[in-house]
Image: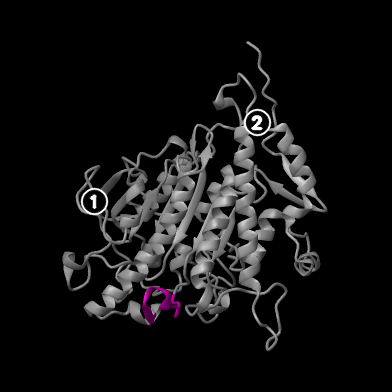
Amino acid sequence: MHLTRKHLSRRTLLKGAGFSVGLPLLDAMIPAATALAKTDAAPKLRAGFFYIPHGAVMWNTKHGKEMDHWTPSGAGADFKLSPILEPLEKHKHAVTSFANLENKASVASVHKYNPATWLSGVKPDLKAPGPSMSATIDQIIAGRIGQETALPSLEVRSESETEAVSCEAGFGCLYSATLSYRNANSPLPMESNPRKIFAQLFGEGATAQERVAIVRQKQSILDFISERTKALQLELGAGDKVRLDSYLETVREIERRVQLASNRDLSGVKAPEIPLTEQDSTFDKQVRLLFDLIAIAYQADLTRVASYIMIGEGTNRTYNHIGVPDSFHPLSHHADYLDRLEKLVKIQRYHMERFAEVVAKLAATPDGEGTLLDNSMLLYGSNMSNSNLHSNYPLPTILVGGGAGTLKGGRQIELPERTTISNLHLTLLNKAGLEMKSFADSTGEIAGV
């Protein structure tokens, strides 16, 4: 048998004029006659954590189960997705929903501790002179699977920190503006500017001065690597050429959208280093673009861990683009009025639709013997339940993906009442290979995940 497959390193970069672009997994990166488990095609876990504020419309309003638009009906594998979760129907086989989860670390915090305690299960020490909590599970997992990538983890948010309205006096936004703590005293900033995120991923200049200079040139980084791209295409088979072209077209499209998003009239204000894009008229594009950046970062193996605050805790953002002109936070205090609850459902479904789009993209992206969705572990939820009461039980929580062969999916898991969310944290940590005995106030792993 004559084997001619040429081996290309998984770490191959297209380089030019100080730029480098990572590549998706190509057939040429897999040595001929090599077992997949021993190559770059072996499953590599991607982990994602997607946070929404203000809970979800569940059974705990005065309207009871009749108004529950979040909780799936049925149990086990015979469950039916709810109106809010319905956008995930095509990928229901990869969805696990959890009932009766609680996070005691955020009880009575209203909004200000919700984001940071969602992934830590630990209440902040408010007597400490600075940030004091614990490492969050995204960062613990990044320590395990993120060291082989350009970015150990990626932290993004659709609104800037200055738009947050839930920051506590004396503590700023230490616990409300981020999901991620590297350790007990190190909160990680979450970037909202797509251009800066793009630069993080693709190396658009090593310094602020270089980034500004490159923006002024109005050139694409793909233009800088065109010669190397042409040379590489001559070395690839037909299938790899198609895959590479598709990937680079996606990079080009994101570049185009980032450029469009930044073309604002800033003549009346002092422009920041790189123009921000957070504004009502472009919010939907902002949300979609950040999801696309996460997806392509996974595809190019630039990072394997991402955390995303889809909308800020306590936000006053309006949703005119879906016919809801009301501000999200005031609307969340629905007082059990049906018209307000119905508007909240529209907002919550909107965010689920955006999440479902990235799930579909991951499912359509080959990765080793499966897809990126097969190799992903995506946690989506909130650290609040009934927003009118600021209650923290039960927490709307779903898990999506195959977890690189570790997750079952396709089920609704009914847990004992007031099961700590730290049990889910512990389960995910161990699915990621951490082999931990406990986490925060956990009492054990969750069976059947």
The CA distance from mark 2 to mark 1 is: 43 Å
Q: Which mark is residue 280?
A: none
Examine the rendering and report whether any part of residue 135 can be seen: no
- 190 to the left or right of 68: right
Residue at image point 39% right, 40% down: 407
- 170 to the left or right of 392: right
Q: Which mark is residue 237?
A: 2
Magenta highlight range? 314-326
Find residue 378 and report its horizontal and vertical position in percent. Answer: 44, 50
Q: Residue 155: which quarter of the image? A: bottom right
Q: Which mark is residue 80?
A: 1
- 37 to the left or right of 204: left
Q: At label 2, which amino acid type do we have?
A: Gly
In magenta stretch: residue 322: yes
- Name the colour scheme: one colour
Find residue 208 and report its horizontal and vertical position in percent. Answer: 77, 67
Residue at the top extreme?
Answer: 1
Find residue 372 and report its horizontal and vertical position in percent. Answer: 50, 42
Residue at image point 34% right, 77% down: 332
Q: Secondary structure at mark 1?
A: loop
Q: At label 1, which amino acid type do we have?
A: Lys
Classed neighbour count for the residue bearing mark 2: other residues with Cα under 10 Å, few (<14), some (14–19), many (≥20): some
Residue at image point 60% right, 64% down: 257
Classed neighbour count for the residue bearing mark 1: other residues with Cα under 10 Å, few (<14), some (14–19), many (≥20): some
In magenta stretch: residue 51: no
Figure check: 20 above or below 196: above
Q: Nearer the viewer, residue 339 or 104?
A: 339
Residue at image point 55% right, 62% down: 289
Q: Residue 3: which quarter of the image? A: top right
